[in-house]
């Protein structure tokens, strides 16, 4: 794997934020493709027992293609879980991975730096969390690989599979095969033709998720019939 060829992996038991550590690594010029792993990310709502990891790289992409990184990251998580466990998760636009309508993984993508943009990808997967002792309200919203398969899955098997799936799709993006990646992303979505609530820092609006554009953005029809293009970096969806 060329993107992860440095094989620089650092593991923590518990951190406040993986993305913050990634930003520190970038300042120290640690090689791109470095992976940071933790068993607990304290800013996450999920309890201990999951797999959280971050990595960063310098995207060789045009600016308009950068949002597609989130799209291929989400698809890569789905394929990694499917390959290792046999489960069939889906994507709740933009970057939440669900199984039977319950969250099983989440993804954060950001760009750090103005003149030398660095993509920071953070993934949280509920691998070996036992939700049985937790309140019903949590069990209704979240699940884990352990809960669904009754098997303990080696975290590094999931991580290795994700790295392979992500690099394969990133290389397709470099070869201008974005249309294939968008089609694959659409096939995993649960959101299209559903009533949704779009929430940002400044507004909240109800409507229908109509379609996904080639860059992974959402076409959204408001209750007043106005069609809007929503970027995944701008909003949350429920």
Image (spheres, grey):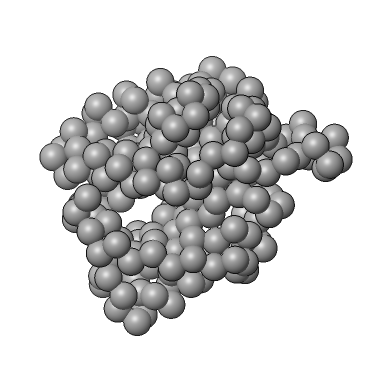
Above or below — where is 3 with respect to 21? Answer: above
Is the C terminus in the top left, top right, bottom left or bottom right quadrant? top right
Q: Quadrant of residue 167?
A: top left
Report the residue at 41% width, 29% height from top: 83
Above or below — where is 90 with respect to 72? Answer: above
Residue 236 in view: no
x, y percent for residue 50: 61, 49
Instruction: Return the residue nearer the eye: 28 or 202.
Output: 28
Residue 145 in view: yes
Report the residue at 50% width, 40% height from top: 95
Report the residue at 22% width, 50% height from top: 1
Residue placed farthest to the top in the image? 193
Q: Is residue 68 left or right of residue 234?
A: left
Instruction: Return the residue nearer the eye: 27 or 52.
Output: 52
x, y percent for residue 141: 73, 35
Q: Is residue 89 left or right of residue 150?
A: left
Residue placed farthest to the bottom in the image? 28
x, y percent for residue 143: 67, 34
Q: Is residue 173 left or right of residue 66?
A: left
Instruction: Return the residue nearer the eye: 201 or 108.
Output: 108
Q: Quadrant of residue 144?
A: top right
| Number of numbered tags placed on the structure image | 0
Above or below — where is 154 with respect to 117? Answer: above
Q: Is residue 175 left or right of residue 15?
A: left
x, y percent for residue 204: 66, 42
Report the residue at 59% width, 58% height from top: 39
């Amino acid at each position: 794997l060329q993107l992860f060829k440095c094989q620089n992996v650092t593991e923590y038991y518990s951190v406040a934020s993986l993305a913050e550590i990634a930003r520190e690594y970038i300042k120290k010029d640690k090689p791109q493709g470095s992976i940071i792993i933790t068993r607990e990310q304290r800013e996450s709502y999920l309890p201990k027992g999951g797999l959280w990891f971050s990595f960063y790289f310098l995207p060789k992409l045009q600016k308009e293609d950068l949002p597609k990184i989130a799209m291929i990251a989400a698809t890569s998580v789905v394929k990694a879980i499917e390959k290792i466990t046999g489960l069939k998760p889906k994507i709740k636009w933009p970057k939440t991975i669900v199984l039977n309508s319950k969250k099983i993984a989440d993804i954060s993508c950001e760009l750090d730096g103005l003149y030398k943009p660095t993509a920071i990808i953070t993934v949280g997967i509920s691998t070996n969390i036992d939700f049985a002792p937790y309140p019903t309200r949590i069990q209704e919203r979240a699940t884990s690989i352990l809960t669904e398969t009754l098997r303990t899955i080696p975290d590094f098997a999931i991580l290795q599979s994700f790295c392979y799936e992500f690099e394969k799709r990133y290389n397709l993006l470099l070869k201008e095969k974005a249309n294939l990646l968008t089609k694959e992303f659409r096939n995993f979505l649960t959101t299209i033709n559903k009533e949704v609530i779009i929430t940002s820092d400044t507004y909240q609006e109800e409507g229908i998720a109509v379609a996904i554009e080639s860059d992974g953005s959402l076409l959204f029809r408001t209750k007043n019939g106005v069609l809007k293009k929503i970027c995944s970096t701008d909003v949350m969806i429920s």
